[in-house]
Image: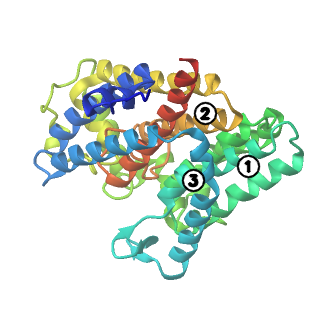
Amino acid sequence: MATHFDKPSLWHRVPLWFRGFDGPLAFAVFMLACAGLLTMYSSGYDHGTRFEDHVRNMLIAGVILFIVAQIPPQRLMALAVPLYVVGVTLLIAVAVFGVTKKGARRWLNVGVTIQPSEILKIAMPLMLAWWFQKREGQLRPLDFLVAGALLLVPIALIVKQPDLGTAVLVLAAGMGVIFFAGLSWKLLLPPVLLGLLGVLLLVWYEPQVCADGVRWPLMHDYQQQRICTLMDPSRDPLGKGFHIIQGMIGIGSGGVLGKGFMQGTQTHLEFIPERTTDFIFASFSEEFGLVGNLLLISGFIFLVLRGLAIALEAPTLFSRLLAGSITLIFFTYAFVNMGMVSGILPVVGVPLPFISYGGTAMVTLGMGLGILMSIARSKRLVQS
């Protein structure tokens, strides 16, 4: 006797699509997105269509998050090599015949203008996680050297554009995979100590090394100027130091409780430059104060901790490395942006996740969150 099975209705299938989604991670993202919408409305309501575009970008990122979350980690691993090869090929194409804007060659015109370096923020951790997964249980020093070479190729192409901000994010993503794969901290300690020594020497001899006419090797003039401006923004308060000075004024003027929603004078009198993009944290700080900053930072800390928890619970080496690296990207985004706005890091053009305006970065964040959801979802479905 034949048995007839009715096809489930759409009403019954929709809950299955969300089954296994990580609730704490979704809650953290939702709260940060709400903070971003409030801040963008205040900062960008008189700035063309910035708020409407920000809402659209968030919706697109949400759709991408949902789609990527449906892809099992095994299929994501199959995309690692093709995506990496495409990304590096496009970076080479940018170096040969890319579009130049404001002195930087970062874009490629393929009917629409794209920024291929953004692909590497996801392709790089995918590729390195795939590499170490293939060598699980038999890792040798040579494998770490090959991983370093895979990382340095796109980094060199991105730095050449030049785009230091994206290079830092791709480097953080790649180094996260290599470190989580088992690279000894003893090998990382010497370059860190050399970096700290360089910073101390720079602070001590700042008047000499930042004097007019002094040129640093291996650095563009604008990169040297950013570092020297960080050391002493008052050397050019109406020029190169204006961004840092106004950012710090905006953060400080908020006090403990802030001036209130849409009451930020530094923001709305347009003293804060790039108030909807790189320096939106200064606008947020002015209106919501120290309390708002602590809540925002707590949100990012919770997101990072939840991402690391997903990495620890992941069933395969590929999933663990990928989840840990994606989580490190979110940490780097937030840390570098808040650091540069508050004057403790050079200005490198890194947006604040979910808060800053920018379609490409929002799409990248949506993909990263989708990957985290996919890894968390696969484990939950297996357990059930």
Q: Amino acid at mark 2?
A: Gly
Q: Is residue 197 left or right of residue 298?
A: right
Q: For the view shown, which residue lies furthest in the left direction? A: 46
Q: Which x, y percent locates residue 111? A: 34, 76
Whether tag 2 and tag 1 are in contact, CB under 8 A, the answer is no
- Find the distance from the CA under tag 2 to the CA under tag 1: 15 Å
- Count of marks, rendered view: 3
Mark 1 residue element? helix
Q: Amino acid at mark 3?
A: Ala
Instruction: Please state, as top left, top right, bottom left or bottom right, where the N terminus lies in the image.
Output: top left
Does the rendering let one see residue 214?
Answer: no
Determine crowd level at label 1: few under 14, some 14-19, many 20+ residues with C-alpha closer than 10 A.
Answer: many
Say whether disc 3 or disc 1 marks the residue closer to the N-terminus: 3
Determine crowd level at label 3: few under 14, some 14-19, many 20+ residues with C-alpha closer than 10 A.
Answer: many
Q: Which residue is mark 1?
A: 131
Q: Quadrant of residue 288?
A: top left
Q: Amino acid at mark 1?
A: Trp
Q: Which residue is mark 2?
A: 324
Determine crowd level at label 2: few under 14, some 14-19, many 20+ residues with C-alpha closer than 10 A.
Answer: many
Q: For the view shown, which residue lies furthest in the bottom direction? A: 97
- Find the distance from the CA under tag 3 to the CA under tag 2: 14 Å
Q: Which x, y percent locates residue 98? A: 46, 77
| Image vertical order of residue 290 relative to residue 171, above or below | above
Whether tag 3 and tag 2 are in contact, CB under 8 A, the answer is no
Q: Which residue is mark 3?
A: 123
Say whether disc 3 or disc 2 marks the residue closer to the N-terminus: 3
